[in-house]
């Protein structure tokens, strides 16, 4: 990393920073952003200093990681915590880049890391990771400066630098938002988002008492919705021209096999992991948030029933309809991409999910011989998701690619689809045997 630390712990704030003299383009962009907001940030300093004194970032050891299982409302759940006086959280998907950022900028001082992180996060994802879509740059930079003035001598003397960055970036965002904490060390809610064992391990290394909250949804709806989502994402790649892609569309395998990875706790952390149902967020939010607040060790407050980011309504748009907060119509089971045989296969394979998570399933699936017979009969039959995937590959990739002269790519479609079928068959068989042998346990619902 070609950046030398400019601000050492305990030194007075120096501006403008020397980040714009280094080769790293993200750091240089951050320096430019800081310079542009410097005058406005300076004017905000009195209020930010007062707030910064209310936080004790090195003492902030309570933390919870939020993970999703397919499209199951992880962003909605996080939005319910926005504004709670004993919780600090970064907006939307901003937090999922914390550890990657730290790895790339580990040699930079804490204060430079805090300045560069928003610029970095905005470059690696969509607007959902852009911190400055939620808070003004001047507010954030003033918050970092205020924390440096109030706590400049503390980093380096307590704990690991990675943990310090995690603590201070959460405190900086809270100060930037103008929020006074209920106590000096509030709970940090961190969006890990994807199920990632290495990230979970690092999180617990930094916060030994850390907890994991997984969002879950009716399994059929989860797989069906994830198929649509991955299809849209894949079709949008290469400028919306899948026939020019170097890879074949693969939403069917992604939807089915990913779910089989995401519905379990991280290895070794089952005792500190709980799942919350998407449907309860829409149909019984108060009861859910009371249980969750109790498990996380915070007091229930009415603010936990408001879906916001920095006190602004979190508006969700889908199918031409917009809403904020609970939407009971969104809690119904959907299976647009499944036929009857597909649903039976899922009921048999994911019986434990339906049973443990309290979702409706055929009563006959309680009997193991029925599940065995269902798997045996339907295991070799391509699901309707795979059939839809095959049509996409042929119609949107293979045939257009052949017309464009990409003959080798077009001819590879058939072998690819055969291999995908075998991959799904193998995944289903291995998963079913693991569950049969008791080696596979799904997430524990709260």
Image: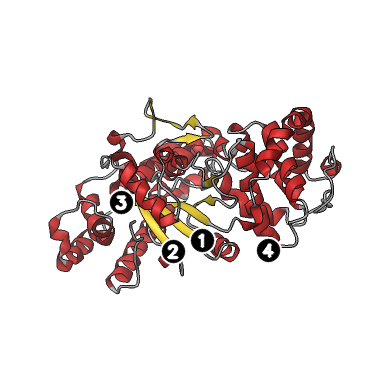
Which of pointers 3 and 4 indicates the residue nearer the eye?
4
Please tell me how crowded label 4 is: few (under 14), some (14-19), or many (20+) other residues with Cα within 10 Å: few
Q: Is 66 or 308 nearer to us in this picture? A: 308
In the image, residue 239 lies at what x, y percent? 55, 33
Marks 1/2: CA–CA distance: 7 Å
Residue plotted at (74% across, 47% down):
150
- Judging by the rendered image, the residue that carries numbered circle 4 is 159
Please tell me how crowded label 3 is: few (under 14), some (14-19), or many (20+) other residues with Cα within 10 Å: many
Disc 1 secondary structure class = loop
Label located before the other in sequence (1 or 3): 1
Discs 1, 2 touching: Cβ within 8 Å: yes
Q: Residue 272 shows which numbered tag?
A: 2
Label located before the other in sequence (1 or 4): 4
Label located before the other in sequence (3 or 2): 3
Q: Is 328 or 226 nearer to us in this picture? A: 328
Label located before the other in sequence (1 or 2): 1
Q: Is 97 or 280 nearer to us in this picture? A: 280
Above-or-below relation of 111 to 377: above
In the image, residue 35 lies at what x, y percent? 80, 32
- Judging by the rendered image, the residue that carries numbered circle 3 is 219
């Amino acid at each position: 990393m070609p950046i030398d630390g400019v601000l050492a712990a305990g030194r007075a704030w120096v501006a403008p920073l020397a980040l714009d003299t280094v080769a790293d383009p993200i750091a240089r962009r951050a320096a430019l952003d800081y310079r542009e907001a410097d005058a406005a940030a300076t004017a905000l300093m009195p209020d930010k200093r007062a707030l910064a004194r209310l936080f004790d970032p090195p003492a902030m050891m309570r933390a919870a990681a939020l993970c999703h299982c397919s499209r199951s409302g992880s962003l909605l759940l996080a939005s319910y915590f926005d504004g709670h006086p004993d919780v600090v959280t970064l907006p939307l998907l901003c937090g999922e880049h914390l550890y990657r950022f730290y790895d790339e900028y580990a040699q930079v001082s804490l204060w430079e890391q805090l300045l560069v992180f928003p610029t970095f996060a905005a470059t690696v994802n969509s607007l959902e990771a852009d911190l400055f879509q939620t808070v003004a740059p001047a507010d954030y930079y003033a918050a970092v400066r205020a924390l440096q003035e109030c706590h400049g001598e503390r980093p380096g003397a307590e704990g690991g630098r990675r943990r310090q960055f995690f603590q201070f970036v959460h405190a900086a965002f809270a100060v930037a938002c103008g929020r006074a904490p209920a106590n000096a060390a509030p709970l940090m809610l961190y969006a890990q988002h994807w199920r990632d064992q290495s990230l979970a391990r690092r999180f617990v290394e930094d916060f030994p008492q850390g907890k994991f909250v997984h969002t879950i949804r009716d399994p059929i709806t989860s797989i069906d919705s994830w198929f649509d989502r991955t299809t849209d994402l894949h079709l949008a790649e290469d400028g919306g021209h899948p026939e020019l892609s170097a890879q074949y569309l693969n939403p069917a395998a992604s939807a089915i096999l990913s779910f089989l990875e995401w519905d379990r706790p991280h290895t070794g952390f089952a005792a500190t992991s709980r799942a919350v149902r998407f449907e309860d967020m829409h149909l019984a939010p108060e009861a859910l948030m009371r249980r969750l607040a109790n498990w996380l060790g915070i007091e229930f407050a009415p603010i936990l029933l408001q879906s916001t980011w920095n006190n602004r309504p979190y508006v969700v748009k889908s199918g031409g309809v917009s809403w904020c907060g609970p939407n009971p119509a969104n809690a119904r089971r959907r299976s647009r991409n499944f036929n009857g045989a597909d649903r039976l296969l899922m009921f048999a394979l994911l019986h434990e999910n339906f049973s443990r998570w309290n979702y409706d399933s055929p009563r006959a699936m309680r009997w193991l011989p029925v599940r065995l017979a269902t798997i045996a009969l339907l295991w070799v039959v391509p699901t309707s998701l795979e059939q839809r995937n095959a049509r996409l590959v042929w119609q949107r990739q293979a045939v257009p690619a052949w017309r464009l002269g990409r003959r080798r790519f077009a001819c590879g479609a058939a072998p690819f689809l055969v291999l995908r079928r075998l991959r799904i068959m193998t995944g289903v068989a291995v998963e079913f045997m693991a569950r049969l042998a008791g080696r596979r346990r799904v997430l524990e619902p709260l």
